[in-house]
Amino acid sequence: MKKYIGEGALLLTTLLWSATFVIVKESLSSVSPVVFVSLRFSLAAIILSPFIIKVFKKIDKELLIRGLFLSVFFFAGFATQTIGLKYTTATKSGFITGTFILFTPLFQYLIEKKLPKKENIYGVILIITGLIFLSSKGNTFFNIFTELGGGFNLGDFFTLLCAISFALYLVYLDVVTRKYDYMPLVYMQILFTAVMGMLCAIFLSLIGFEEIKFSFNNQIFFALIYTSIFATIITTFLQTKYQKTVTPTKAGIIFSFEPPLAAIFAFFILDERISSFGYIGCALIFTGLLVTEILGNKKQKVKNES
């Protein structure tokens, strides 16, 4: 039962995250990316503060170091994704972010010495194929590859760094949450990310990479409220508490629902359309999850019966 509760929690997390592609993309015309990340997590930290006082008693030196190390990956993922969204499309951002499921089994093996199961590999292959279809705006096989390979830009590069960061985060989170209480980790990740966002915004401004910009309006207000409460506090709580009930590879596969869900939000909010191959991609991604789930349960049932 814990397994299914955990998977449901991660699916809800994915749903809440998927809306942020559209929301954040629209907001970046009024605020610089790292400033937005800093404000998002600062607001989340402030909201959590009254409920978190008792948690500080549980934080010792070792947990503080672990939490800081985990937060580096956490911050790197959100910062590079947000910067990337400034320079690339929401569709390509969703696809490239989804490639972290390629890196997750590799890092899981390097860090935890756990080889992914065969059904996970089958699922990953189907999902990557689905993501390729989903990211294509064309309707022929030739267009799939010309669309993906012809316009790799700075935003795509930062989003690729985002995928690597989130893969490392998933695996290290699996390690840390098996040893420590999840609540101190939730707050430390949010607080440290807010601080790192401020420092990073100042640094990028000093070296001339990004101008510090913020223009308050209704769109920014809604974006900060949604991303800080729903896509930060709630999602971080759900992921930190429940990810340990599933493997990092399975978590990566569940999170791969983010691109098709983001496409659905873009369709209804921005009237963005996906190609015929996009619908095929959604079907392949869903099939990949089913393959992993059905084969995994079948093997577990046979093992239990024997």
Image (tube, grey):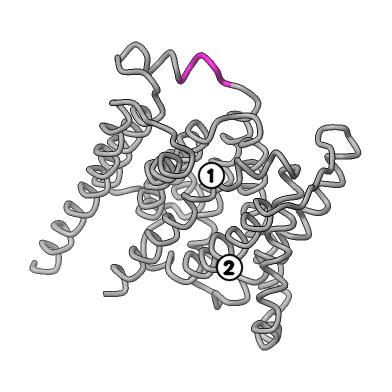
Q: CA distance from mark 1 to mark 2?
A: 17 Å
- Most extreme residue toward the right is 206
Q: Quadrant of residue 300?
A: bottom left
Main SS of residues in magenta: loop
Which region shows up in magenta?
Answer: 148-152
Q: Residue furthest front?
A: 218
* Residue 276 sits inside the magenta stretch: no
Determine if residue 3 is in view.
Answer: yes
Decide which of tag 1 and tag 2 comes sooner along the chain: 1
Helix, strand or loop at mark 1: helix
Q: Quadrant of the C terminus?
A: bottom left
Q: Residues within 10 Å of mark 1 (few under 14, many from 20)?
A: many
Disc 1 versus disc 2: nearer the observer: 1
| Residue 105 visible to the viewer | no
Q: Any mark on residue 233, and which?
A: 2
Relative to 14, residue 94 above or below: above
Determine which residue is flagged by label 1.
21
- Of residues 119 and 197, the one nearer the viewer is 197
Callout 2: helix, strand or loop? helix
Image location (x, y in percent) of residue 129? 32, 30
Q: Residue at x 13, y 57 (%)?
A: 298
